[in-house]
Image: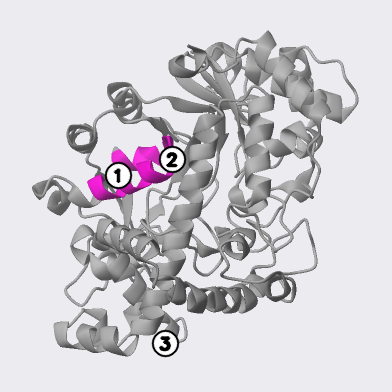
Amino acid sequence: MRESGILFPIFSLPSKFGIGSFSKEAYAFVDFLYNSGQGFWQILPVGPTGYGNSPYQPISAFAGNPYFISIETLIEEGLLTWDEANGAYFGSDEERVDYGALYENRGALFRKAFVRFQEKLKDEKTAAEYEEYLKKESWWIEDFALFSAIKLKKGGASFLDWEDELKTRDKQAIEGEKQELSEEIAFVCFEQFEFDRQWKKLKEYARKKNVKIIGDLPFYVSLDSADVWSHPEVFQMEKDLTPTVVAGCPPDAFSRTGQLWGNPIYDWDALKKNGYQWWVKRMERNYEFYDVIRIDHFHGFCDYYAVPYKDTTAEHGESRKGPGMDLFNALKKEIGELKIIAEDLGTNTPENEKLLADSGFPGMKVLQYGFTSWDSYYVNHRHINNCVVYTGTHDNTPSRAWIEEINDGERDFVRRYINSINTDYGKFVWDFIREAYRSVADLCIVPLQDYLCKGKEARINSPGTSEGNWQWRLRPNFLSSDLERSIRELSELYGRIPKEPEEEAE
């Protein structure tokens, strides 16, 4: 079935409190999707971020980002007041996230809410709901809360720099920290409870509007994460929790020394012995968040590049085999049907292509990558039904900036291929979007910035840079009914209006 959707991160939603959240603006965007004839909302990973604020370097593969908790909802629940919320500073630019201001002030506000939440636990219904949540998520939340509490106590220091007894989770030392930090542990659990409750309410609203959520799952986790600390057996580590190898990318024409990512690498042999249970639990948790999961760096399941931990470049790494279909067969056995989009961008090998074909998952076709050669892998005539076409992704500059920045020969190629004679770059962008809709791909995803004809100021991420990423926000009241109608016309014209659920149609 042909459908379409919009790529728009949670943090990019408009909000008066510094960052997009599960507030009324999120519900309004679901309405916008529904009215625009869109069946999908694609977001970026929602895990808690560490240094650099990248959602692809989460400090937990299971927890949610407290920044996305709606302050308005906390007010409605009687946990905060408007005066308290309005009195906190979250930055002065409504189009950019100020992570420094959030770090300094949002936590302090939530701690006030936590004090009042503890009073609400005297209510039997609230207490029962909270206890049920903690019991259900006990496999990860206890370790995550303790990890977060110790990390705060240590001034944010990496767990690799903690005392040996804490680093290696000596039983007596851990019990001592649990007692000393019980209040902070309870606060972290409260944040996760609120995140879950608010997100699942929004997801249910989207379901009723016939909008499905595509979530993003990073292939790797951060080295300094609760996952590595609490489950070192999942990764290739020494007994003192020093990694033996870390992730990277081999040298190529673009980088003489390769790319050193630094993420810990999975011990696939150890994982296989217990039926890949850590991955089973991770996928189950993510299916609580999303309807469809886009797995980043899908090629890593076929083969991965391992670099010795102490190396300062990626020159001396080696390529190793990943778990391949063995992992996905185990996941299907435990979970059932896997609704997955494979991020298969980059160098395609026969082995990569075979794994994608064997899995049956749709891969990705990014139109911006299609006009550097005359028979690119990404242009429309190379598409198949079982794929997802994008104009660009969160790692691309918006299409308007891309069209302005490519050379004259490439721009002429694009014009002739998509049959666009528009000299106005805004109209050119819409012709480019139309080309994506025209694809035979079952699913078409367009970043919101492209519909708005935004330039490079609205770029989400510039790979290889550490400044200015994950910050762009939509200005309040910027989406119009005229834009809804224009997008819906495309959806209708190219047969991408989602089918209403049978029970609702009846």
Residue to which mark 2 is pinned: 290
Left or right? Give the position of 436 relative to 255: right
Does 354 sit above or below residue 472?
above
Query: Can residue 212 be seen at all in this image of the molecule?
Result: no
Residue 78 falls in image quadrant: bottom right
Mark 1 neighbour density, 10 Å: few (under 14) some (14–19) many (20 or more): some
Residue to which mark 3 is pinned: 153
Does the magenta stretch mainly form a helix, a strand or a loop?
helix
Q: Is residue 128 in the magenta section?
A: no
Q: Residue at x 63, y 52 (%)?
A: 23
Under mark 1, the amino acid is Glu
Give the magenta part as a residue range: 280-301
Residue 86 falls in image quadrant: bottom right
Residue 229 in percent (x, y) is at 28, 70
Q: Is residue 284 in the magenta section?
A: yes
Name the one closer to the observer, 96 or 164. Answer: 96
Q: Earlier in the sequence, mark 3 or mark 2?
A: 3
Mark 2 neighbour density, 10 Å: few (under 14) some (14–19) many (20 or more): some
How many callouts does the rendering have? 3
Mark 3 neighbour density, 10 Å: few (under 14) some (14–19) many (20 or more): few
Q: Earlier in the sequence, mark 1 or mark 2?
A: 1
Give residue 335's mark: none
Residue 343 in percent (x, y) is at 45, 36
Residue to which mark 1 is pinned: 284
Separation of marks 3 and 2 at Cα, in angstroms: 33 Å
Residue 119 falls in image quadrant: bottom left
Q: Residue furthest left?
A: 273
